[in-house]
Amino acid sequence: MRAGSHVNPTQKCDLCPIQHRSVCAAADGRIRTDLNRISHRRTFAAGETIVGEAEEAGIVGNVVRGVLRMVRTMADGRQQIVGLLFPSDMFGRVFASHSRYAIEAATDVELCCFDRAAFEALLVANPDVEHEVLLSTLDELDAARDWMVLLGCQTVLERVAAFLIIVRHRMMKTASDGWMPGPHISVPIGRRDMATYLGTTVESISRTIRAMARRGVIRIIDAQNFEVVRWDRLVALSGREELDFDGRIAGPQGHRHLADAGSAMRQTVAGRRVVEMEE
Amino acid sequence: MRAGSHVNPTQKCDLCPIQHRSVCAAADGRIRTDLNRISHRRTFAAGETIVGEAEEAGIVGNVVRGVLRMVRTMADGRQQIVGLLFPSDMFGRVFASHSRYAIEAATDVELCCFDRAAFEALLVANPDVEHEVLLSTLDELDAARDWMVLLGCQTVLERVAAFLIIVRHRMMKTASDGWMPGPHISVPIGRRDMATYLGTTVESISRTIRAMARRGVIRIIDAQNFEVVRWDRLVALSGREELDFDGRIAGPQGHRHLADAGSAMRQTVAGRRVVEMEE
DNA sequence: GGAAAGTGTTGATCGGGATCAATGAAGCCG
DNA sequence: CGGCTTCATTGATCCCGATCAACACTTTCC
């Protein structure tokens, strides 16, 4: 179970590819030693469940390699992915006995796991670290609300475009290795997961991606790899100009006039509005 | 601007109806004095904007009376309400210079406002209080993800049913006064806001509520007040059995078989599935 | 090797709900 | 009081995207 427990604890983190991200980055010498003590690496194959829905979740941790999905399954089988976790993201729910969502390996993954109780104790004992957790939780909350907007009032075309931009963004942040610019997007998950994440179906995903390629916005290398031919048009299709050309999230700014005109525009709200792709 | 600044600071909180909720409940004597010092009451009429989208948000605080809405407006005018804030809920975004969403008065409201920088300093100086903020932020994150499920894969009927249950739940928590059981639901917002919150239109909201009344699930007292005739059916319509008959959120438990059958059911996912109302 | 299962694509059809349009009721104000 | 605006409701129509179905391709496992 405690794979690698024979490894020198003071070295585990030093070899970790994400040691300069996540809570680990906030942990100085002594705290890092503590983290070392309660952490252990585990690997899961794609499809395996790390924490079941409604299960007593005894562990939290962060993703070292691969992608996790947080899935909520309803009684009749409908599912919604409420979050994808990339390397350096934390998984699990601190300060609650169970996760409200299943956590599953979307790809083969390598995780750095902490005993939840021990990790919580460490947080309480180290306000600095807990502060970092608060900051990242606030960011996650912002992201979740952004996703609510996407699910609540954007078309499938917009969702797919936004998804591609965000994947690119996340992969860039992750790729500590040189790999950087270039118009390449590598989607780490299949159509099924995309659909479950975007609140649509595999057929719609497939058709939408094909349409974007047909219109020259992207080029399809294979089912999971794309080359962005026209960033500007991809961003336009996403319906969110705050996702700038590099996929960076720019703070909402600029279009102040909109908020001002808010109540005046409220008469036309709520509906889907197709942003047509020019032929 | 600082209305009521002449009031004895050590008494403001003692008269506050929500002094035993929110961060205030976590504040003991000395800290409460600090809170007193940096807080001031403000009132806004329904429709007024407390914090504009992308605006420098200098204040945070909590709702004393009334309801706030957090609204995201897209470039073309589409809107999504990403959260409603009831009495004792905190508003505003700590540790970020601007809110990513507008905060508006959905009804006439009374707020207890803190200077954001001062409040942040108080948090950093008092890990106990910051811990409470972390806990409530985690709860908000869970709620946001629940809403993602609702927006991503539930029908309008299910959304409206879930909304009514949740409103009842929130009003019960708020009503520190005796008012409790009874089959009464008082919705504090209009059709427009409901639609913007549920990712649908006013017409669909209206039709759905009428249909629920026609089938004897609820009785319409007036546009904002309903009597629940059959809680069991309302809960069934919501498609979420974890919202129990009292509207309390029960931890996901019981249907373990579902999570187990997860991968087997994944073939049938993603789609809307109408839960018909029996005639 | 071949059967079986999973994944991605494409076509045909259908329906939930958005959109457009019109009416009544209720508050606001000169 | 009579315009004026906002809100809720109801009817008619349309369309995006879900659903059903079929097929190629790949991977897995006897």
Image (cartoon, coloured by chain):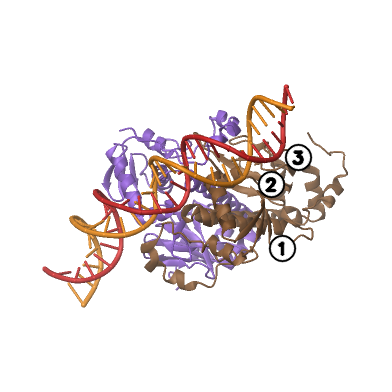
Chain colours: A brown, B purple, C orange, D red
Residue A233, relative to residue A134: is it above or below?
below
Count residues near mark 1 (Cα–Cα under 10 Å), then give few for <14, some for 14-19, many for 20+: few
- Do discs 3 and 1 belong to a common subunit? yes
Quadrant, the N terminus of chain B: bottom left
- Give coordinates of residue C2: x percent, y percent: 69, 26
Is B165 on the left or on the right of A135, as rendered?
left
Q: Which mark is residue A182?
A: 1
Of B10 and A95, nearer the camera is A95
> Which of the marked residues, 3 or 1, is nearer the chain's N terminus?
3
Q: Which mark is residue A43?
A: 3
Mark sitting on residue A67: 2
- Position of residue A257 measured from the top left corner of the image (x, y, whole percent): 46, 73
Q: CA distance from mark 3 to mark 2?
A: 12 Å
Residue sitting at 38 percent across and 33 percent down?
B232
Q: Kindly state the secondary structure of the residue where label 1 is placed.
A: loop
Q: CA distance from mark 1 to mark 2?
A: 22 Å
Task: State whether residue B176 appears in this view.
Answer: no
Chain bearing tag 2 is A
**Chain of the residue displaying label 1:** A
- Find the distance from the CA under tag 3 to the CA under tag 1: 31 Å
- The answer to whether A243 appears left or right of A129 in the picture is left
User: Where B38 falls versus A101 (above or below)?
Assistant: below
Q: Three-letter amino acid code at disc 3? A: Thr
